[in-house]
Image (tube, rainbow, N blue to C red):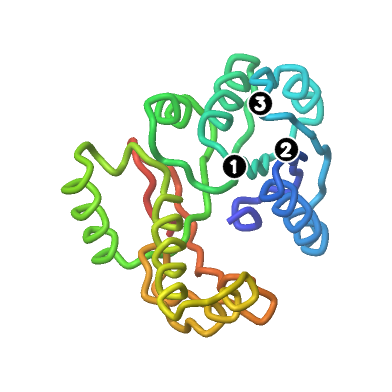
């Protein structure tokens, strides 16, 4: 997407207090450089501060073609984008991981001057509908007001329940039982399992772009 859009200069915004954000920052930077993109600036934020204006002003001076923002919480992303808009940021694009709920996010997505393109785990639409039905029948309200990570949390609990079913006596035996689980049919992805290092299998990701008030697959 970035290359096809003719973009090259990237600024990266990350939270060094978030293991997820830090890992994604390091991974993206390496891949970007190896693919010939120019990282013009890097901005380390503390997302709990809620005031990102100083770094946004610094970033504006570099005039990036797009920014990569691996935020781990939707509120922080919304506040960052809102403050960037207020400070006249006119980046052609922002790339990150999708958060699609909340009125604040809808407002800033709509107010952003360029493309909003996020990666999102590829899921089975029938499983999505099943989870939505089960959740809303149990708790009421719309599942769309919650982060998609609730599917991960549900799958984690169910995998633990399956492992505990074999009566492990300690943490090491519990780990062994979890490693035995193969092709677990979850809601976050269809085939979940752990490798020998305890790392969960990674889902396939698809790109989506914000258009007409919602995220749609990027063609």
Q: Which numbered tag is attached to residue 48?
A: 3
Horizontal and vertical percent for residue 19? 71, 49
First in sequence: mark 1 or mark 2?
A: 2
**Residue 22 or 163: which is nearer the viewer?**
163
Q: Residues within 10 Å of mark 3 (few under 14, many from 20)?
A: few
Q: Is residue 115 above or below residue 104?
A: below
Q: CA distance from mark 1 to mark 3?
A: 11 Å
Q: From the viewer's perspective, tell me whether residue 42 is left or right of residue 72.
A: right
- Residue labelled with disc 1: 72
Give the structural element (helix, strand or loop) at label 2.
strand
- Residue labelled with disc 2: 15
Q: Residues within 10 Å of mark 2 (few under 14, many from 20)?
A: many
Q: Is residue 8 above or below residue 193?
A: above
Q: Is residue 163 above or below residue 105?
A: below
- The reply to whether callout 1 and callout 3 are in contact (CB within 8 Å) is no
Which quarter of the figure has residue 12?
Answer: top right
């Amino acid at each position: 997407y970035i290359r096809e859009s003719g973009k090259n200069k990237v600024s990266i915004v990350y939270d060094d207090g978030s293991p997820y954000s830090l890992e994604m920052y390091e991974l993206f930077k390496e891949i970007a450089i190896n693919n010939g993109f120019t990282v013009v600036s890097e901005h380390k934020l503390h997302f709990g501060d809620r005031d990102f204006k100083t770094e946004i002003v610094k970033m504006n001076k570099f005039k990036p073609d797009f920014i990569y923002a691996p935020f781990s919480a939707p509120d922080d992303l919304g506040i960052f984008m809102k403050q960037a808009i207020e400070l006249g940021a006119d980046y052609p694009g922002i790339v990150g991981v999708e958060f699609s709920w909340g009125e604040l996010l809808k407002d800033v997505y709509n107010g952003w001057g360029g493309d909003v393109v996020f990666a999102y785990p590829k899921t089975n639409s029938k499983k999505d509908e099943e989870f939505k039905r089960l959740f809303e029948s149990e708790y009421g309200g719309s599942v769309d007001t919650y982060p998609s990570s609730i599917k991960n949390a549900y799958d984690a609990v169910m995998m633990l329940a399956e492992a505990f079913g074999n009566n492990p006596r300690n943490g090491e035996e519990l780990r062994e039982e979890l490693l035995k689980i193969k092709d677990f049919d979850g809601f976050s992805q269809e085939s979940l399992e752990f490798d020998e290092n305890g790392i969960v299998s990674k889902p396939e990701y698809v790109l989506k772009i914000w258009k007409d008030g919602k995220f749609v697959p990027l063609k």
